[in-house]
Image: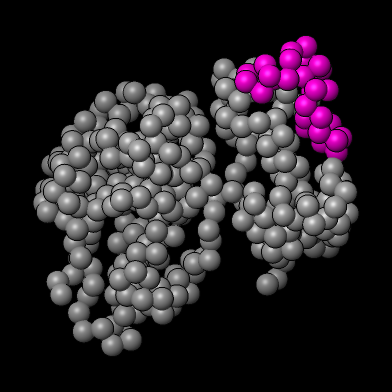
Amino acid sequence: MSPLRVGVLAYPGCFASEVFGVPDLLTMATHVAAAHGADQPAYESLVVSPRRQVIASAGSVLNVSSMRPLDVLIVPGFESSPTIDLDATIANLGPEVSAIRSQAASGTAVVSICVGAFLVAEAGLLSGREATTSWLFADRFARRYTDVHLRPERLVVTDRGVTTTAAFSAMYDFALQFIREHDGPRVARSTARIALVDDARSTQAPYVDSGLIPTLGREFSLSVKRWLDQNLTARYDLPTLAQEFHVSTRTMLRRFGQEAGETPLAYLQTSRVRRARHLLETTEKTVASIAADVGYRDPGTFSGIFARTTGQRPREYRAKFHRHHDRHGAIQRTER
């Protein structure tokens, strides 16, 4: 069989590392597969663009090939910030949006990395589909593309030939999944080991820092969140919460839901888990003690909620993220 033609769409302002990240891992996989007896490369990678010249992030000049028939088109993310003018950014990338739409129409599988999902959505490919993107921009994405079923906790989502990934390093999660499908689990596992890439991740939830998410237009929900944070260990009671803010329980749920996209109880559970994550990372307290510190009398209930939120049990999370201070005060990772 001929190699799969994998093209990466380069465009002005795209992250250069996201242009080359997947092809580089596919190159490693090709060498690994050859060592395991494969007689020909499984992939042919190239960088394509509807433009003659592309200057990527940090002024990197990229050599590009013209658009052509492909089996897979990868759309990297662009240099972005929570205050970026998305309308202007996307308007300047009209040729790329058209190229994505054209490739999909010809049967090419489309993959976005990070906020590349915005371009794929602009091309109309995510309407009615499940998708993910960087957790930092998930709210803006959901507000802009209301017909997309966003799964912001997921690292990689594939729905009817269109794949989206979470932020930056999730390109490697996709690449390993892609290698696993085409070269088998042994090649994928060996490639991950050689590249020092984690091949066991399933969610971006452990990495979310809600303090970094933009809060414009959420004054009511922010006030409620502050109150919940200040009363983290108190028993949750919706009528009491509503009374604190001089609204009915129905109004509390409606206004908070409109601004925050979740219920006050869901936020409280997330906030408790966030505090627990900090304690697991920085203290030697037992899981039961931490559960009590964040408002749970039953450690089992706490562990279940923690696992649903982060994708890992408290002890698993501690084994991966725990830090301790050496005698000089320097922070070190726990040996694993």
Residue 27, picture quadrant: bottom left
Left or right of 7, for residue 185:
right
Which of 61 and 34 lies nearest the eye of the viewer? 34
The residue lying at 34 percent from left, 59 percent from top is: 22
The residue lying at 53 percent from left, 61 percent from top is: 201
The residue lying furthest to the top in this view is 246
Which of 90 and 174 lies nearest the eye of the viewer? 174
Q: How far across and down, in percent of the image, does residue 220 sit?
A: 67, 17
Left or right of 307, for residue 168:
left
Image quadrant occupied by the C terminus? bottom right
Image quadrant occupied by the N terminus? bottom left
The residue lying furthest to the front in this view is 250
* Magenta run includes residue 241: yes
Q: How far across and down, in percent of the image, does residue 76 sit?
A: 33, 46
Which of 129 and 134 lies nearest the eye of the viewer? 129
Residue 329 seen in this snapshot: no
The residue lying at 35 percent from left, 38 percent from top is: 128
Magenta highlight range:
228-255
